[in-house]
Image (tube, rainbow, N blue to C red):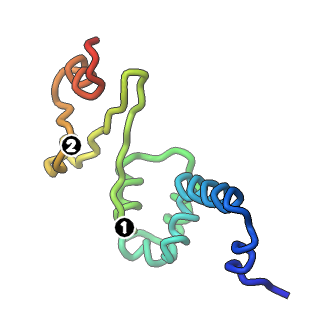
Amino acid sequence: MARNFKELQAKMSPESRAAAKAWADEAIKNMPLDELRTAMELTQENLSKVLGMPQSSISRLERRTDMYLSTLRSYIEAMGGRLELRAIFREGEVNLDLGKNGRNSEKQEGQQDYSAPQSARLEASTGRRS
């Protein structure tokens, strides 16, 4: 007999519930494209219409291990999201601009401008001189 998840969850210790939530949160952060699409309750056919390409192309795209960022950005935007890319260094993190023309004209409030020289950018993001 199937049991209600809420009943099972109520019997779990607080530590077990916290561990299960942490595992689920991590799994969601590292979701493959096809699982992300399914979680968003979209079909390949839905995305094919939005992107103007055959459903078979969506299927191939989801199986790729390497693709252009512009392709991935279009896929994510078709689901209503926004793709962000960041580089992580010992000195700090840098959000990379994925604007269509190499520069993102829609800079968000509080977002740093990374058009300055590298040493100035790292200093601004980490507070350390290079």
Which element type, helix, strand or loop, lies under badge 1?
helix
In the image, 128 versus 59, the foreground residue is 128
> Quarter of the image holding residue 121?
top left
Amino acid residing under circle 2: Gln
Query: Residue at horizontal 25%, vertical 13%?
Result: 129
How many numbered callouts? 2
Quarter that holds the N terminus: bottom right
Q: Residue 28, image x and y in percent?
A: 55, 59
Q: Which residue is mark 2?
A: 111
Front of the two marks 2 and 1? 2
Is the residue marked by circle 1 packed among few (<14), some (14-19), or many (20+) residues within 10 Å? some
Is the residue marked by circle 2 packed among few (<14), some (14-19), or many (20+) residues within 10 Å? few
Residue 67 in the image: above or below residue 5: above
Amino acid residing under circle 1: Ala
Residue 64 in the image: above or below residue 50: above
Q: Which residue is mark 1?
A: 78
Q: Earlier in the sequence, mark 2 or mark 1?
A: 1
Q: Residue 44, image x and y in percent?
A: 51, 73
Is disc 2 in contact with disc 1, using a CB cutoff of under 8 Å? no
Quarter that holds the C terminus: top left
58 displayed left or right of 53: right
In the image, 113 versus 64, the foreground residue is 113
> Quarter of the image holding residue 92?
top left
> Quarter of the image holding residue 13?
bottom right
